[in-house]
Image: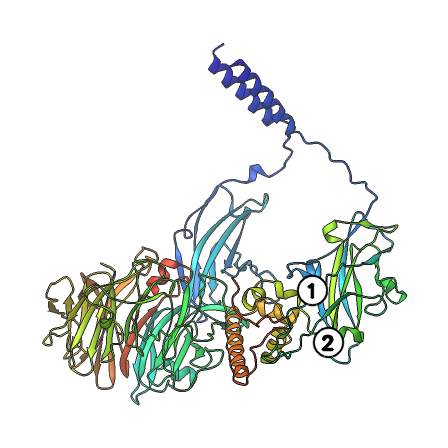
Amino acid sequence: MNIKRSLALSVMVVAGLSMTACFSDDSTLGVDKIGTIEVVTGMEDTTYVATAFIGDVLEIKPEVVTSLDESELSYEWTLLSDKTGTLDENGDTIQPQVIGNSKYLAYTVETPAGQYQIRYAITVKDSGYSLITATDLSVVTEFSQGFYILKETTDGNTDMDMYSASGNLSQNIISNTTGAALSGKPYSITPNYGQFYINPDNDQMDATNTMVVITENKQMGVYRTTDMLQIFDQNSILFDGAAEGVQPYLLNRTGWYSQYFTSEGMRYGMTASMGSPTSGKYGFVSDVVHGSKFFICDYINSLGGFFIWDEINKDILWSNYNMYFEPIVNSEYGEEYSKGLTDWECLSIGYSAMDYVANFILNNTKTGARRLYLASGGMMASSLNALVELDPASHMAKATAYSTNFYQAKYIYCVDGGKLYACNLNSDTYAEIDVNLSGVGSGEEITYVSNQFFQSPWGEYSVNAFDYLVVGTQKGSEYHIYMYEMVGGIPSGDPVIKFSGEGKVAGVRYINQGYSENDLGMMISANMYTVVD
Amino acid sequence: MRRVINTMILGGVLLAATACEKDLELYSSEDCWLNFSYSENKGSLEPSESSYSFVYAGSDVTIDTVWVEITTMGFVYDTPRAISVEQVQVDIVKPELPAMPQDSTGAPVEEIVVVDTINAIPGKHYVPFDDASIAKYFQIPAGAVSQKVPVVLKRDASLDTCVAILKFRIKENEFFKVGYEDYSTRQITFTDMLAKPSQWEYGYMIYNYGEYGPVKHQFLIDQTGEPWDDEYIVALHDGDSAYLEYLMAKMQNQLNALNAERVAQGLDVLKEADGTEVYIGMVY
């Protein structure tokens, strides 16, 4: 006999013998009642968005194809969150919430803002056989997603407006929710994704998205973006309260750490990337780096390095992902060009994802001269790429507002004399071009510019992605905001979003509740907004 | 090649044979065993050991009870079954005394307090396990598989200056044999002085506050007003990790401030009785 043949035969005999060994199938499952069920449309590859607590009804009408009669089927829609399956404060397992038992879903959305999964189970009544499909649901509130506008009120204090995803403008949110605007002129506004705090709804330590507003009068308000509840101020965020005279600068997070910079120095804690939620409070100053609102992530690695201006020590610093700080120098320009710059103030910080280069614009408070620093970071070290003494006649040397294009062009936008210009960093002479804007009302003076976007350098979150040039103008006591789509960094056509409100605009920041604080790639992206512009 | 084929066939037949189910024999052993349950003491690195101090109990407390769970192995019975427990004497090694710190004249600078460690004496330091007053607890109730038995500690005056060790074990009787060796003994260390909490060795305390010492313990109590006993340590650990970090830094700062104050007064920095400097901080 052929050897190969006998080998194959032997294997088959053994396999057959194994399969017949002592096994009899006496199951009575209704095999004749399984039929075929298929959900053709309406579920997978779809993300639904609904607004909570305003009577918004979520309707899903999946197309179901089956050989069975509809009377033979039952349906169940369930809602699951990231808490489903965990224990509540009583030690009970949190169960999925049943939100429907019909073929089609019509659910009045009354659940906290957040990310959910909807599961649709079709069950053959006789056999119990089920087909389960799922889709994503993003529940928002009017505050949880959209653009926040930091503004100076007509009496010189700080308040915030909000332009929601549904196109509504809510004005004077701070004074309307807390009774008064924050005292002092606006200093900064920052989205803080995954801020730890003790949720007053259940007294549990939790994470939430917040907007952080700081004034020049040493006031800070940290607001939960689902409902604008103020969860911290400059005192309650510290276990020992704030010492008198301390100026808050920045409450932010990078990859592993959350940082709180003040004129006392830096405090830090962990983020959700590193562990379970805490109270979100901070203890003692852990580093003499004081920081400022001039902060931007170093996107060349996704771990959380950053560039920062130290307002007290007058230093230009880079930090790696583990908060190892160093001055930005090169062989030509030593530490004297980046540390102890007592005669200088920082006007702007920015970053281009095209070449992963950060920029600082400094102003000499005695001479009025301005410098542009271009610097690169990385995993373990930074370097100063160029130090440019700006031509005093240039718009860059006289500008009152700056912003850097992140994705599309190596431009630093600047506002000079009420007009918008772009400085081309690809040009050896740092040539400037006029940026023409369509749709700006007559008599309005451009006072503000910012590149706001929601898209990751690594491609996540492509849904609802945008990349806008945001321009703010002033006319009398009213500000106007215009948001333009861009082609190659230049505004294209009429603004896609425009609105106006009372006061002077001091900052515009976008927040998207669909972002998960544990998503490392998006986390960097979501925190990429420079705080200064 | 034939040999290979034959081997494969033989292997296959054996494999097939193992696929056959065989009825398991019904459990029929009449023997039953007892073990201590360490689950209530799971935070400790040595779950069989725990500690207690009357210091935390209040000045009017003269006796206190530590409840110890015992579980059964074997059949459940519909009648109560007695539990027997007996004390085990521990070999106690006296530590060598450290050198007495002296000033330039040779006079002792600080008194060294030597704490005796002894085996607990039944009737004096604890209520004997066979005492009639607690006999009703020393039985597995009908239909039950576990029972919590009391270890009744007595606040004898000798505990003001010594630490008592009560080590005890399951004792075989007509109903039960001794269970697993690792689960057959328990030890309670108790005193009327500050005692090392059982939880000190658990996780963050030993890691962030270093080795235990009574002077360190008293310092922490003085600074916070908290007892730093097992209950407090567990609550800290299960609570806010940001607060844990803050509290350690705060205790470090306050220890530094106290030491600076002592040095300014001509005193030594804070030390344990054996001369070890009190240290609070990360231990690597």
**Lower sequence index among marks 1 and 2:** 2
Q: Is residue A120 above or below residue A140?
A: above
In front of the other: A89 or B190: B190
Residue B204 seen in render: yes
Q: Residues at marks 1 and 2, common chain?
A: yes
Under mark 2, the amino acid is Ala
- What is the secondary structure assignment of the residue under circle 1? loop
Residue A355 occupies which quadrant of the picture?
bottom left
Q: Is residue B44 above or below residue A420?
A: above
In front of the other: A61 or B166: B166
Please state if A47 lies on the left or on the right of B260 as rendered. Answer: left
**Residue topped by disc 1:** B95
Please state if A189 lies on the left or on the right of A127 as rendered. Answer: left
Please state if B112 lies on the left or on the right of A246 as rendered. Answer: right
Q: Position of residue A31 (x, y in %)?
A: 57, 37
For the image, the number of numbered tags is: 2
Residue shown at the point (77%, 73%) measured from the top left: B159
Under mark 1, the amino acid is Pro
**Residue topped by disc 2:** B57
